[in-house]
Amino acid sequence: MNKRIAMLAFGLFTMCAVWCIPSPSCALDIKKEKLPNGLTVLYVERHELPIVMATMLIKASPLQENAEKGGTAYITSKMLSEGTETRKATDISREIDFIGASLDTAVNDDFTTVSLSVLKKDVDKGFDLFSDCVLHPSFPADELVRKKELLKGSLKQKEEDPSFVASKEFARDIFEDFSYGRLVEGTLQSIGAIERADVLNFYGSFYRPENAILTVVGDLSREELDKLLNRSFALWKTTGADNGSTVDPKLPPVLKGPRVEVIDRDVTQASILFGYVGIARDNPDYYAVQVMNYIFGGGGFSSRLMKVIRDEMGLTYSINSFFAATKYPGRFKVEVQTKNESAGRVIDEMLKQMRLMKAESISNQELQDAKDYLIGSFPRRLETVRKTADFIAAVQYYRLGDDYIDRYKDYVAKVTKEDVLRVARKYLDDENYVLVIVGNKKKLVLSK
Amino acid sequence: MLMRSLKSLFYLLILALIQPACAFASVQEFALDNGLKILFIEDHKIPLATFQIWYKVGSIDEPAGKSGMSHLLEHMMFKGTAKYGSKVLSNMVQRKGGMDNAFTTRDYTMYYETLPSGSINLPIEFEADRMKNLTLKDLESERRVVMEERRMRTDDDPQNLLYEETLAASLKVQAYRKPVIGWMAEIAAITRDDLAAYYGTYYSPDNTFIILSGDVYPDKLMPLIKKEFGPVRPAGDKLKRVNTVEPGQQGEKIVYLESESAELPYILSEYHVPSFPDKDSFALDVLSSILSGGKSSRLYLSLVYEKRLAIEASADYTDLSREPFVFIFSALVAPGKEIKEVENALDAEIEKIKSVPPSADEVQKAKNQVEASFEFARDSSYSEALYTGMFQILGDWKLKERYLGGIRNVTAAEVQDVARRYLTKENRTIGYLVPRKREGRSE
C-alpha cells in the first residue's frame, strides 16, 4: 500500500510482535493429512464469513541458494504469477483482479509462501489460478528480465531508508557468508547474475509436493475441499529431484569484542542496530527467552527499554529487542532511532539495562505480566482466517507438534524467575556484539 | 515491525475507503444525555472484542501556529491521570493479552484496545478516566518523543518530505495543508495551556463516539458505559469549528525538491477534488481503482509493465474526508529513466481515459474489488469497527449504504466525465523529487 497514505495518520506506538508465537486455550479443529503425492494438507473449517484463505508453504529459501545468485528463491516465487503453460502474465493479473482476490508470495530466511485470498463464491476460479501458478509456471524469459529490473530498482529505492541500510549491514556483519546474512531479495549484483536456467533449476528442485505444506482455512466443507484438491494439488507430480534438504549451511562466525560500524548519511536521526546471532526455534530455552525478552525490550510499553528510554528519557519514538527464532540460530537485535546527538546516550542506557537483566532477578510482577501477555495474546494470533492459515503452516514447518496450540500455555507457564536470569546471562551479551549506526558523522555523539 | 503494523493499519483505512457492495454486520446505536454516542457491532465468532473511542478532532481543527497539537495530545493521553500513571492502561491491557494504540489523522483521533472479550470492561473505565482527568504531566519528554517520530517518518524520508511539501503547495488556504505531525518549530511552540484548552474543548462527549465490536453484548456493557461516561459534561457552545474553503487554483504549481537521501526520482501529482458524499465522489473512486487497482490496472500495465519507465505507479483518492482533499498520482522512476518520461506517460493515461470511456469490464472489476475488499476486512473486529467509524465521523454510520449504492451505480461515462472535469493541468500541483549527488554513492 502506498507509503504516502501512511502519512495521513500517526500512531502512538505499535508493539513488536514475536515470531511464530504463543497460544493458550483456543482450540482449533485442524484436520491434517498427507496426499499420496506427499503434500501435507492442513484444513480448518470456518463458516462465519464467505471467504477462503489458503497458504502454500514451500521449504525453499536463501538457505538453498548459491550466494553468487542470491535472490533466486525470491525471484522464483515472484515469477510464479508471471506466466504459466496456458496463461500470460497479464491474463493472470486480470483474472485475479476481476474477482477481487489476491495471490501473493513471500520469502523469509527459512521458507517461501504463496497465499490466496478469495471470496467463497469465486473459490473454484481462485484455486484454479493458485494451482496453475504453483504447478505450471513457465518462467517466460522476457518476464524474468522485467522482474529483475523491478527488483533492482526497488532495492535501490530502499537505500533511502536509514533503517534498511542499517539492517542490511547488520545482517551481513553477524552472519557473514551464512544465508541469513543476505537480503532475501539478493543484491544488485547477484540479481544480475540470475538466469532463467537458475530459476528453472531452483523451481524443479524445491517446488515439489513432498517439500510443501498446504493450509486451507475458511468457508469450505470437506467435500468441497476434496473436489478442489482432486483437480489441482492432488495432481502435482513429484519430480524425484534432490530437494537439497541436507544442505549444510555455513554457520556464522563467533564474535570477539564489539564490532562498531558507522555509516555516514545526511540524516537528522541515527538508526542504530545492536546484536548478534541468537537462538533457533528448536532451542529448549525458547520460551524462557521469550519471557525474558518481553521484559527486556520486546513487550512494548511494558518493556524496560521502552519505559526508560522512551517514556522517562524521551530519547526515541521506539526501541525494541527481538530474537528471531528461525530454523538455524537467528538474529538477536535491539533496534532504535534517536537524533544524532543522543546516539551515545541511548546506546549506553541500553547496555546498562542489559547488564541489569543479567545482574539481578526480575520481580514476581514482571514474570507474571510477561506470562499473562504471552499466554493471553494467543487468541489474537488466530483472530482472522488469514492469520490462522499462516500460523498453522508455520507450526507445521517448525515441527512444533500437532498439540502445540493446546500445550503452548504450559510451555510458558512453567518458566521461572531463575530460568529468566539464566537465559539473560546466557543470551544477552554486552561484550561481544555488532553495533551498526547509520547517522550523520558530523553530528553523531558517541561514547568513547 | 513498527512500520509494518502501521502499514497494515493504513491498508485497512484504504479498504474502508473503497467500501463494497454487501451487507455490514448490523449496528446497534445508543446515546447518553451528554451527547455521547455508542455503536455496537455484535459478532460472537471468537472470544475477542475491540473498544474504539473516536474524537472528532484532527489537524484540520488546529489553530494557526500550533500544527501537530492533535497528535501531541494523543501522545499525552498515554501519560496518565491522577488515578492511573503513564502507560498504566497499556500495561493492564497487555496483562490481559490485549493490545492498545491510537492514531491521529487530519479529521479525527482514535484510541483503541483489542482484547479477550472477558476483559472488555477494562478500557471503559480507563477511557472515561482519561477523557476527564488528564494531567498533561511530563510534556517535555513526550514532545521530544514526537520530534523523534517526525525525524523518522518525515525529515529522513525524502518521499514523505516531498508529499508534505507538495500538499502544502497544493492547498494554499485549507487546513489540510498542514502535516498531521506538525511542523517542527510548531511542535516546539505548543504549550501545556494550549493542550489543556484544546483537550477541554474537543475531548467532550458531544464530540465523541464509541464503537464496540466483536464478542460484545450491549445489555451487559451499557450500564457500565452510562456509569463511567454519563457524568462527563458536554462542551456545548465551546465546540466551534472554522471552515476554510480552498479558492480555485489559478494554474499549475510545481514543487521541486532535491535530496541527497533520494536514490531514485519520484513524482507526485495532486488535483483538487470533492469528497464523499458529493455526487462525483463515487465515479472518482472507481476511476482510481481502474487506474491503479492491482497489476491489471492501467498505470501498472502502461508505466511499469509495457513502457518499463516506473517501479511503482498509483492513483489514490481519499473520498472519506471531512473537507475536500486531493486526488494523488505517484510514480517511482525506474533507474536510468527520466522523470519527464514518466510524467508524460502519466499524462498520456489521463488523456486516454478522458477521450475514451473505460470498458464495461474495467468498471465491473473495480466494483468487484470494492466488494471483495469489504468482505476480507470483516475478518477482524478492529477493521469492522474502523470503517463503521469512518462514516460516523462524517455524521452517520448509515452513510455507508449511500456509499455502496453510489459505487454500484457508477457508469463508464461518469468515470470519463470526472476525469475530464478534474484531471486538468490548471487544477494540479506537481512535486518532483530529484536525487542530488552524494559522495561515494553507488550508481
Image (cartoon, coloured by chain):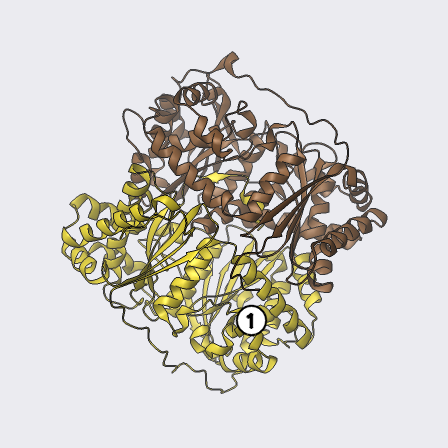
Chain colours: A yellow, B brown
- Give the percent coordinates (x, y) of residue A41: 46, 70
Q: In the depicted view, which residue is nearer to us: A377 or A161?
A: A161
| Location of mark 1 (residue) | A75
Residue B303 location, quadrant: bottom right
The answer to whether residue A410 of the structure is visible from this angle is yes
Residue B70 left/right relative to B293: left
Q: Secondary structure at mark 1?
A: helix
Nearest to the observer: residue B128 or residue A426:
A426
For the C terminus of chain B, which image quadrant? bottom right
The residue lying toward the viewer, choosing from B190 and B205, is: B190
Residue at the image position 73 percent from the left and 64 percent from the top: B306
Q: Residues within 10 Å of mark 1 (few under 14, many from 20)?
A: many
Which residue is at 74% across, 59% downward? B302
Vertical side of A241 occupied by A385: above or below: above
What is the chain letter for disc 1? A
Give the image location of residue A80, x and y in percent. Answer: 59, 71
Asked which quadrant contains residue B338, the reply is bottom right
Residue A286 percent location from the top left of the image: 26, 62
Q: Quadrant of residue B224?
A: top left
- Residue type at numbered disc 1: Ile
Q: Indicate left or right for B283 with A10 as reference.
A: right
Residue B370, position in %: x, y? Answer: 64, 47
Q: Is residue B197 above or below residue A267?
A: above
Say whether residue A220 is visible: no
B239 horizontally vs B317: left or right: left
In the rendered structure, the answer to whether residue A74 lies left or right of residue B170 reads left
Q: Nearer the viewer, residue B364 or B182?
A: B182
Against B243, is A319 above or below? below
